[in-house]
Image (spheres, coloured by chain):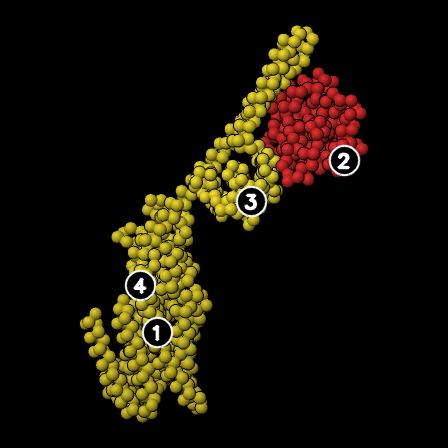
Chain colours: A red, B yellow
Amino acid sequence: MRVVIAEDSPLFREGLAHVLGENGFEVVAEVGDAAALKHAVHELEPEVAIVDVRMPPSQTDEGARAAVEIRAERPGIGLLLLSQVVEAQYALKLLSEQPEGFGYLLKDRVLDIDDFVQSVNRVAGGGTAIDPEVVGQLLGRRRVHNPVDDLTGREREVLALMAEGRSNHGICEKLFLSPKTVESHVHNIFSKLDITAAPDDHRRVLAVLTYLRA
Amino acid sequence: MRSLTFAAALVGASTLVLGVAVYRVQVDNHSPHAWAAATVAVAWAFVLAGLVAWLRRPANRMGPLMLAAGLALLARQFRYSDDALVFTVFFLFGELGYALIGHSILAYPSGRVNGRGARLLVRAGYATVIVFPLAVLLLHDRTSTLIELPGVPRRSLLVVHPDPHAVEVLQKTQIVFFYGVLASLFVAVIVQRLVRATPRARRMLAPLLLAAVALALRAVYECAHVFVDQQPLAYPYLFWWQIAAGIALPLALLAGMLRSRLARAGVGRLVLELDRAPATPRRVRDALARSLYDPSLELFFWLPEQAEFVDDSGVVATLPADDRRRAVTTLDHDGVTVAALVHDPSLLDEPELVESAGAAARLALENAQLHAEARAQLQQVRDSRRRIVSAADEERRRIERNLHDGAQQRLLSLALRLRSAQRRSNGDEGGAIDELLAASVDELQGIVEELRTLARGLHPTMLTEYGLAGALGALTSKAPIPVKLDVCQDRLPAEVEAAGYYVACEALNNVVKHAGADGASISARHDRDALVLEITDDGIGGAVVGDGTGLQGMADRVEALGGRLRVESPAGSGTRVVAEIPCAS
């Protein structure tokens, strides 16, 4: 799979390229700013772009803005945003701009290489990868009556993984549960939270996040 | 001053006597009584106005000029005498009175004739009224007819070559030149002066309009008198009109000058007015503008320490250059500049007025100067306070950036390398190295997490990246109580966003720690170029600025940016903190 990396810290960029290379990805370009990223995507047509949110020259959200532009030009590309800090409100905003093939992860997640590789693959396949921190922020939000409180501990775990963008299969692996058990948890969650069950993985994520945001 | 009053009284008394004599002379020459009296009245009006003006404004040449005009008008009537010497002497006074009247009109109100054209006109007038009568006297003997002096033949003592025809031509030429050409030019100069005048000057110059009318009437009268054989029916009306204008003119000129005199009385009021209430720069300016009748007046104060002028709000100002529209007068005390007035140039005609107003307002001006100085210093302090806060913010941002771009990235990269190493070692070295590397990665990740927390405390990345809306969103999602958030998405200047963020942090912190609230709400809107931030809760209330809840710090931070912080916290009904921070720097 062809990947472009945009990250202004050379050390981290190299490390990332190395990890991806070792795990069967073909890193076709490593760039350090948004302009070079846009150029590389245009020229090399990668399947996935892994983009640092904060890049020169403004050191604000250059990367995220470049991602929106890239999406407009190439709707099918997978975009994985990396950041030192993740924020639920911002994640939801980005997600509403690009619902498919989108990921938003804390940089630290790269350290869990298997999980990270899965996330890249999911995003490349049109799926979603949302940082657990974001999901945690949404789940932990205080409300007067929070139906999430009605969920069992296991159901909450499943809900969190669902919100991160994982498929039932992914949840099985993560929690060491049988597919049947996961399916029944998912069914319970949907009915307890009163969410319409959605077929595709990414629709499911959207439904869950929409619920959590409300 | 007393001798001047005495002299004036003497001149006035003599003029009365002289007037009666002139009246007799005219009546003896078969002038109607009323007409003779009217002629004397015009002369008296000028003498009276001249004397009063001279007494009131001794330094101004208007008084002597009008006095001389009045006396010349009286003197000319003695040419009716059939005594050869008296006739010869006073014939020379012919139109001198009118030349003097023209001069005083053009010199109004300062006593000086301004403008090359006007000065030339005055000189031409004098030349005409001296040269022509002199020439007539040189050519006149009993045989030639003198206009206005029919009947008794009079003898010139200066005659050298009698020529009746030349006498007639000379006299008519004089009338045409003086009352035709020069009078038209005179009216043109006055009209031009009125058109060009600034509003203040136009009010002062109003008498000139009357002067122009008076002179035009006089000219028509004179021409009708000389050149129309069958005198028209309107002739008596013309006579009385020009008499009325002739009496009104000196009185109007005098009134115009006394207006400045009134203005000087206004200066007296100025002192009282400034004594009554504290002399703020603005009040002093207003009072000066009123007493000098110049609403456009601007006042600038000299700050000796900074060696520059400031306006009445303490802002450094550059004085405009003197030109036709604005004039600058500096006010000094003991040779030290106190202030500068930028005013209507017409005030330059009354330097004493400006001077006396400046002197009257001196104490107030010096007070106001101190005021202005204090304001300027306050402004400097405000600026430096703002700079200090900005610098501190900038420093925090810089450290946060360094952490982000430096230590955090490098530690993360290092962790990533160790992770790669760990994966490669899998199976080769058994559990020990693997475990060691895994522990190291965990340790590094912990450090990165700590640094992240530290950086967030210094300056939240969210604030830099996503502005107030993003940062407050992150803040409230971690809050232990539900917080309703309504924040505009606009990006504002960095120091404003930072101040807003810290105020919200501190306020929310207080809500959680002290208010015992079940919920809070934060709203931020960008309103008329200011950030209006409002944090409310439904807690116990009773918060006070300065009681160690951090409210004082919030207030300081907001005020440093020129904003305001209000805290409403009635006991038992929640707390409302409102910060208004202007965005313009």
Query: In terms of sequence position, does the residue under pointer 1 or pointer 3 come before the other?
Result: 1
In the rendered view, does B559 fall on the left or right side of B12? right
| Label 4: which secondary element | helix
Query: Picture coordinates of residue A157 (x, y %)?
Result: 70, 27
Q: Which residue is drawn at 40% across and 49% down?
A: B314
Query: Picture coordinates of residue B352 (x, y %)?
Result: 30, 63
Q: What residue type is labelled 1?
A: Ala
Give the CA separation, mark 2 to mark 3: 34 Å
Disc 4 with disc 1 on a shared chain: yes
Q: Name the residue under label 4.
A: B272
Quarter holding residue A33:
top right
Q: What residue type is labelled 3?
A: Asp
Q: Report the label total.
A: 4
Mark 3 Cα-neighbour bin, 10 Å: few <14, some 14–19, many ≥20: some
Give the CA separation, mark 2 to mark 1: 99 Å
Q: Is residue A124 visible?
A: no
Q: Mark 3 points at which residue?
A: B538
Mark 4 Cα-neighbour bin, 10 Å: few <14, some 14–19, many ≥20: few
